[in-house]
Image (tube, grey):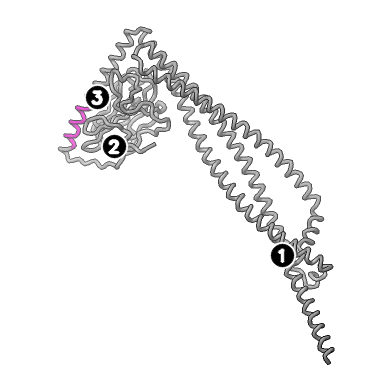
Amino acid sequence: MRIAINKNKTYSWVVLTGLSILLASFLFFPIADLLAQEDIADSETTESQSTEDDVADNSNGSILIDLNDEIDAKRDQLEDLKKKTDIYEDSIKTKQQESITLNNQMALIDLQVVQTETDIERIRVEIEGLNLELEKLGIEIDLKLDELNYNEEVLAEFLRLIYRYDQQTYLEIFMSNGSFSDFFDNLRYTHELQGNVENALVETKLAKADLDSKQASTEEKKDDLSLLTDKLSGSITDLNSQKDYKGVLLDDTKESEETFQALLEEARREQEAAQAEIGTLEKKAREKLLEEGVDLDIEATLMWPIAPFRGISAYFHDPTYPYRKYFEHPAIDIPSPQGTPIRAADNGYIVRAKNAGLGYSFIMIVHTDTISTVYGHISRIDVAEDEFVVRGQQIGLVGGLPGTPGAGRLTTGSHLHFEVRSGGIPVNPLDYLPAI
């Protein structure tokens, strides 16, 4: 009886063990077998595609190496050009400190022409470098897209195999394991495959983040390229203005120092007359507005009358201003192409809109009981005196090219002369404008 009971227990243990193995086989189906079958079925296609991908990757890798070399060469070239520009800038500052003579002005213009030509070359090299970087980013983005597509295909294949596994019957699962050794080999492979899938998921996320970063960088570089293109156009305009100025100066002076000094004196009188007229008119305008009870609302800061894309060429009371020995520079000069629209810096009342023909044309606006603005070298006036304007309204066009309407005497190129006055006294406009 004891023996029979032991036999029954032994039989039960065998049955349970068999069921456990069958259940384990269900839980850890040998995906390796299916993968092997898929590999055999698709081996020719996979090998062919792999070969094409390897060739493409090697080709792109070679291109990227060449692009990196070209980009490094452009950076070295930019550094050399920057050093040259700095040398010319120092020479210009030295020349500006010397006495104002015709020969001095000719030499100064020549230095400015060479500096501008160097700056143009620098911008062109910078544009070429940006285009190379954009080309490089394009290739890197394509590679990342290929990587993402490959990872997605691997994950899709895994899910497809899991689905096929779910369709197997218990008998098929049991028969697929020829031995315990096969079972445990497949179990180990299954764990490895699961680990690979987890890695693929992580790599896919990283690749996607890297792709997003490269695409964002591409858009930023495109914006930089657009700004540089505009800057190049402006520098070419500056170069032409400098050459025109030299030609006009030679024509006006007939290469005579005496005539040049007479022109300087005429320019000084013109500026003094304009400043005196502005001061007188501002006082009368404020008295008139006070009598009429006009209250002008303005913002906390003024807006830029033109966008300062090309910086500032002369600052308030600039020590390097070429004519400072004759008169202080009571404004900032904002370089901009001839004909650029000028906007009112804020709501205000047009006190003066002077069209001086080929002389110095300007517009003056009173904004509050203390602040007023002046816009000089106007090539076209779009407002009338005694009218009100609103912030951002177009009031005229930029001038300043030698020999053009509104430019006045001895102007060096197209720009806006922009003054801010507080209580009738010129103050630094940068204290009232948004930072750039």
Q: Residue furthest front?
A: 2
Of callouts 1 and 2, the N-terminal one: 1
Which residue was labeled with disc 2? 389
Judge by depth and name the residue closer to the eye, 354 or 186: 186
Q: Residue 172: where, in percent of width, then height?
A: 80, 70
**Magenta stretch, overall SS:** helix
Disc 3 secondary structure class? helix
Q: Which residue is mark 1?
A: 163
Q: Is residue 349 visible?
A: no
In the drawing, does residue 154 fall left or right of residue 70?
A: right
Between discs 2 and 3, the one toward the N terminus: 3
Label 1: state its secondary structure: helix
Q: In the displayed structure, does residue 279 sit left or right of residue 194?
A: left
For the residues marked 1 and 2, what is the alpha-carbon distance in whole angstroms? 73 Å
Residue 285 percent location from the top left of the image: 20, 32
Q: Residue at x 31, y 11 (%)?
A: 261
**Position of 310 relative to 262 (above/below):** below
Density class for disc 1 (Cα within 10 Å; few <14, some 14-19, many ≥20) is few
| Mark 2: secondary structure | strand
Q: Is residue 416 left or right of residue 55?
A: left
Specify the quadrant that holds the C terminus: top left
Residue 378 in the image, given as x and y percentages of width and height: 33, 26
Q: Which residues are magenta?
A: 279-289
Q: Depth check: give the residue in front, 361 or 49.
A: 49
Q: Give residue 355's quadrant in the image.
A: top left
Q: What residue do we see at 77% from left, 71% from top?
A: 169
Q: Quadrant of the N terminus?
A: bottom right
Tell me the residue that label 3 is attached to.
275
Of 366 and 24, which appears nearest the observer? 24
The residue shown at (69%, 36%) is 62
Residue 99 drawn at (x, y percent): 34, 14
